[in-house]
């Protein structure tokens, strides 16, 4: 365990707010999006590493746009991804598939050029896609109601058990007062449609409690989490 | 459901900032006294009340409004359900048990506790009074 | 007792500021009631029949005199002069204004108190044996672990939106005064086979519509693994607890549906993955927290015996309301908040101030709240018992009825609670009045009354339980017999058809009379008689045609 002074912010705490947003002490540096990425076709075996810590394989956020739906890295962006419903054919560009669609068409999709993302509903399992996770540059976890807390556990399992390092996005009912918890369990982008939440984000008015009693993530926790590592006032 | 009188209702809820019980009154204001409440005597009138309640709820004038069935007896509106009687008259706790000094003898808004639940009311304290302070004896 | 450091104090300050902002957005209309309600619940704010209600956390039921005085001040300044101590060792105020609540929370923060997570589908106040750190029969003080769990569970980002509420209770004695088997997680602190401290872990207890007693899922959890094991339990529950029906959403339903073994297997699988990670408790941390709960500096001068000739009432009070202390020359004192005919668990501001004075002067500045709605002075010198008694007499709280039939547990019921179907307080008052003349003769008998199926009065584990329901628009009461929340935990049996508000008082009296007739000797308590004879003689007395 590194000494407290040397604990560096967890690299997994991505999407950290720009200074305009209320933030926690000792948390990660602001997210700097990497340059746009293309994927080469991969015939045969699944393309590896898209979701595995290799930043150059990630899909960059869409253009910054105050009307855009995606809050990421301290700003609103247009969505670089398309959500695929039902049986529609794959569009051009990064596409998010429902988990059932992926499982049903895994064979055909294996050789596809496009960056793929997955959207997982709260009651769905992770074990049947665990081996495929590196394939996805983005995973979206859906909050049908903001009171459904299952995606928080799914997020932690994705990050901490399965080592998922791609973009983890919260979609559905995403409101001001849950954003801090979502970040702490590993979400780094948010699809926000609730108007008061959008205003609060734009104005930097998300009130948070910047001290944490419990660690999340598997990296050495930042200052301000584990009680026994907290600095005392004196 | 009363067999004596037809089903009539008032719209009631809680005031947002202090939570106190209010009723939708004749001029669209929310009042604390049921005597000032608008009475719905037909299903259409009841629906109209509920619609007004929904509008006022969205405007934060009231929280969680709902229809409460009442009976009109001798010109007074009396709620049918025990729940509504308690909301209007305050907690029904007995305050007149011999030898017991209730710490909270007052009902809200100065309304008397339900006569049907009490023997003669025994209210030792006046406004703001507390029981005698403890004399802690010297060791 | 635990003292906040700068981290704890700042945490509560920030949480209060966060809630103040949320209240502001509600009052301005930016937040709808649907959006605000889950947020206000997580700060202990209910909307009840007459007004808002604020539930203040009293972690493991422990208070200093300074904190008790602050509660009295809040009762006087922001409420109508009283508070109600609850069956989870918390305190409720019944008349706060929403617009005042941020200020109330600010005042509470000054004395290291808050209302965080006292409601909502999250981890609630961790309760513990109210005699912790004092009882002669204690193996180890459970409160350091309750404090560690409290910290770990505070604004836990993963477990703030559980399927349903989550309650943890801890005992450090074989005699379970914390009723751990009625909790979602019950922890029994004890010595493991190797002599070190650890826990038996019970999961899936809970009352309400479908009551269950907890199942033992691990008998020998080392103390260092406490948090990782709890995290594994909570994660399994968060993912797999039902969310389609609030009456089927507690962990007790999951444990029952899967079976204890299958449930335990899922927990153990997750626990194995995280057991040696960041949640492993260093011994230094356990010791650091335990140091806050070190035995106080007892006054060890010899003490004269209390004047037992001082009167029958004092003798009774000594017999019923004092309990063996681990330190020679000391006693644990129960302050009954159940004066005959009174409102169970209520105390006025003046009474709270007086209790604070007594605690500061005679109990090393400590008070406890019990889940049976009484208070405790945990460290009283035997020689001071007379002074304490006189002090309680002056404020009307000297009834020597701890554990007797008039020491009734009752939820606020339909007089206050928006969820209730029937009133419970007047029923308690009438029963107390009716049976008080015979209370000493009757002996140990716990009556517990709930005004609705949510069972906040814990009626399922009353020796006599009463459940208020609504039947054809009228209040109606079910009678239950033979429950217990102690180490011999059992769920009470429904006796038969219910009764009206007058009838239930008569029915309780009939049960008591039957017990007095049938007990094998005056020392056989009601529960033992019931277990010996079964329900039949009581049913016959209640329901046989005259």
Image (cartoon, coloured by chain):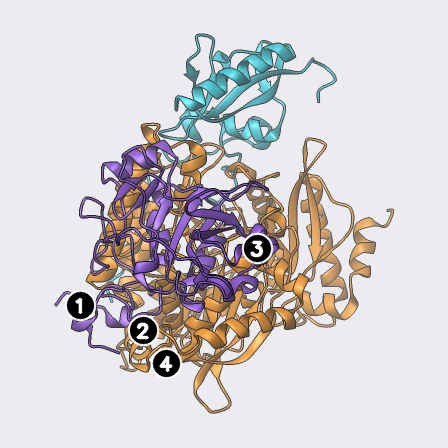
From the top left corner, tell me how far across and down residue A97 is, in percent.
Answer: 51, 48
Q: Colour of chain A?
A: purple
Q: Do labels 3 and 2 touch, CB within 8 Å? A: no
From the top left corner, tell me how far across and down residue A155 is, in percent.
Answer: 43, 58
Q: Colour of chain B?
A: cyan
Please tell me which residue is depicted at 33% across the width and 46% down the height of the picture. Answer: C349
Q: Which mark is residue C293?
A: 2
Of residues B2 and A5, which is closer to you in this image? Answer: A5
* Crowding near the residue tagged with mark 2, few <14, some 14–19, many ≥20 C-alpha atoms within 10 Å: some
Q: Which residue, given by chain and number where applicable, does mark 3 sit on? A: A108
Q: Which residue, given by chain and number where applicable, does mark 4 sit on? A: C327
* Crowding near the residue tagged with mark 1, few <14, some 14–19, many ≥20 C-alpha atoms within 10 Å: few
Q: CA distance from mark 3 to mark 4?
A: 76 Å
**Labels 2 and 4 within one chain:** yes
Chain letter, disc 1 residue: A
Q: Colour of chain C?
A: orange
In terms of image quadrants, where is residue C175?
bottom right
Please tell me which residue is depicted at 55% across the width and 65% down the height of the picture. Answer: A127
Of residues B113 and A64, which is closer to you in this image? Answer: A64
From the top left corner, tell me how far across and down residue C204 is, in percent.
Answer: 59, 64
Q: Which residue, given by chain and number where applicable, does mark 1 sit on? A: A232
Residue lying farthest to the bottom in this orientation: C194
Q: Secondary structure at mark 3?
A: helix
Chain letter, disc 2 residue: C
* Residue B57 visible here: yes
In terms of image quadrants, where is residue A76?
top left
- Taking the image as shown, residue C263 lies to the left or right of residue C528, namely left
């Amino acid at each position: 365990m590194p000494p407290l002074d040397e604990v560096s912010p967890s690299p997994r705490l991505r999407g950290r707010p720009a200074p305009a947003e209320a933030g926690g002490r000792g948390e990660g540096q602001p997210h700097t999006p990497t340059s746009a990425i293309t994927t080469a076709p991969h015939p045969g075996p699944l393309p590896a590493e898209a979701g595995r810590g290799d930043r150059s394989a990630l899909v960059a956020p869409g253009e910054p746009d105050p009307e855009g739906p995606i809050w990421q890295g301290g700003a609103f962006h247009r969505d670089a991804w398309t959500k695929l419903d039902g049986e529609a054919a794959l569009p051009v560009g990064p596409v998010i598939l429902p988990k059932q669609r992926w499982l049903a068409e895994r064979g055909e999709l294996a050789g596809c050029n496009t960056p793929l993302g997955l959207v997982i509903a709260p009651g769905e399992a992770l074990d049947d896609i665990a081996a495929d996770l590196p394939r996805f540059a983005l995973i979206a976890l859906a909050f049908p109601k903001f009171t459904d807390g299952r995606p928080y556990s799914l997020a932690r399992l994705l990050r901490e058990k399965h080592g998922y390092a791609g973009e983890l996005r919260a979609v559905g009912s995403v409101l001001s007062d849950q954003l801090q918890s979502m970040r702490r369990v590993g979400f780094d982008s948010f699809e926000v449609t609730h108007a008061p939440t959008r205003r609060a984000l734009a104005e930097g008015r998300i009130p948070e409690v910047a001290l944490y009693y419990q660690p999340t993530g598997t990296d050495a926790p930042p200052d301000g989490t584990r009680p026994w590592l907290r600095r005392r006032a004196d | 459901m009363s067999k004596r009188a037809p089903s009539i209702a008032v719209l009631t809820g809680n005031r947002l900032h202090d939570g106190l019980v209010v009723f939708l009154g004749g001029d669209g204001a929310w009042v604390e006294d049921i005597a000032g409440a608008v009475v719905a005597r037909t299903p259409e009138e009841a629906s109209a009340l509920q619609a007004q309640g929904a509008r006022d709820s969205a405007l934060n004038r009231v929280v969680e409004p709902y229809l409460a069935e009442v009976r009109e007896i001798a010109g007074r509106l009396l709620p049918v359900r025990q729940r509504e009687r308690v909301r209007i008259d305050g907690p029904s706790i007995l305050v007149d048990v011999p030898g017991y000094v209730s710490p909270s003898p007052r009902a809200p808004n100065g309304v008397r506790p339900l006569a049907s639940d009490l023997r003669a009311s025994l209210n030792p304290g006046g406004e703001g009074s507390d029981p005698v302070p403890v004399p802690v004896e010297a060791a | 007792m635990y003292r906040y450091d700068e981290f704890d104090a700042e945490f509560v300050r920030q949480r209060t500021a966060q809630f103040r902002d949320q209240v502001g957005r509600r009052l301005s209309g930016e937040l709808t009631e649907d959006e605000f309600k889950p947020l206000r619940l997580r700060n202990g704010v209910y909307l009840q029949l007459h007004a808002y209600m604020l539930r203040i956390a009293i972690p493991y039921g422990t208070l200093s005199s300074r904190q008790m005085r602050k509660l009295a001040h809040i009762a006087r300044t922001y409420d109508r002069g009283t508070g109600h101590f609850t069956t989870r060792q918390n305190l409720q105020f019944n008349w706060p204004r929403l617009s005042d609540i941020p200020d109330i929370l600010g005042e509470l923060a000054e004395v290291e108190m808050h209302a965080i997570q006292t409601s909502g589908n999250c981890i609630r106040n961790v309760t513990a044996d109210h005699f912790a750190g004092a009882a002669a029969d204690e193996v180890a003080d459970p409160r350091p672990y309750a404090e560690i769990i409290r910290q770990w569970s505070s604004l836990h980002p993963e477990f703030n939106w559980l399927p349903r509420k989550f309650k943890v209770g801890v005992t450090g004695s074989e005699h379970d005064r914390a009723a751990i088997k009625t909790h979602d997680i019950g922890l029994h602190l004890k010595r493991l086979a190797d002599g070190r401290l650890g826990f038996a872990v019970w999961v899936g207890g809970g009352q309400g519509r479908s009551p269950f007693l907890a199942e033992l899922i691990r008998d020998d959890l080392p103390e260092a693994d406490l948090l990782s094991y709890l995290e594994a339990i909570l994660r399994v529950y968060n993912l797999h607890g039902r969310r389609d029906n609030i009456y089927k959403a507690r962990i007790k339903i999951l444990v029952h549906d899967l079976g204890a073994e299958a449930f335990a297997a899922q927990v153990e699988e997750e626990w194995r993955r995280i057991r040696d990670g960041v949640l492993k408790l260093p011994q230094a941390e356990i010791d650091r927290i335990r140091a806050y709960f070190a035995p106080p500096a007892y006054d060890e001068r010899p003490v004269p015996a209390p004047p037992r000739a001082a009167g029958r009432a004092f003798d009774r009070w000594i017999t019923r309301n004092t309990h063996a202390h681990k330190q020679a020359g000391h006693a644990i004192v129960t302050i009954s908040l159940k004066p005959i005919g009174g409102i169970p668990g209520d105390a006025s501001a003046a009474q709270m101030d007086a209790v604070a004075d007594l605690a500061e002067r005679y109990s090393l500045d400590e008070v406890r709240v019990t889940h049976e709605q009484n208070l405790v002075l945990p460290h009283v010198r035997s020689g001071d018992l007379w002074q304490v008694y006189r002090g309680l007499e002056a404020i009307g709280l000297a009834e020597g009825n701890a554990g007797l039939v008039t020491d009734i547990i009752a939820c606020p019921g339909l007089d206050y609670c928006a969820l209730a179907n029937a009133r419970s307080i007047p029923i308690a008052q009438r029963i107390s009045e009716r049976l008080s003349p015979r209370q000493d003769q009757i002996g140990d008998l716990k009556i517990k009354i709930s005004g609705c199926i949510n069972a906040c009065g814990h009626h399922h584990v009353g020796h006599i339980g009463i459940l208020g329901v609504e039947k054809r628009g009228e209040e109606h009461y079910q009678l239950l017999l033979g429950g217990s929340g102690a180490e011999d935990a059992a769920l009470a049996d429904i006796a038969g058809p219910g009764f009206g508000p007058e009838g239930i008082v008569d029915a309780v009296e009939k049960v008591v009379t039957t017990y007095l007739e049938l007990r094998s000797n005056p020392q056989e308590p009601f529960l033992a008689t019931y277990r010996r004879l079964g329900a039949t003689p009581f049913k016959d007395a209640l329901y046989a045609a005259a």
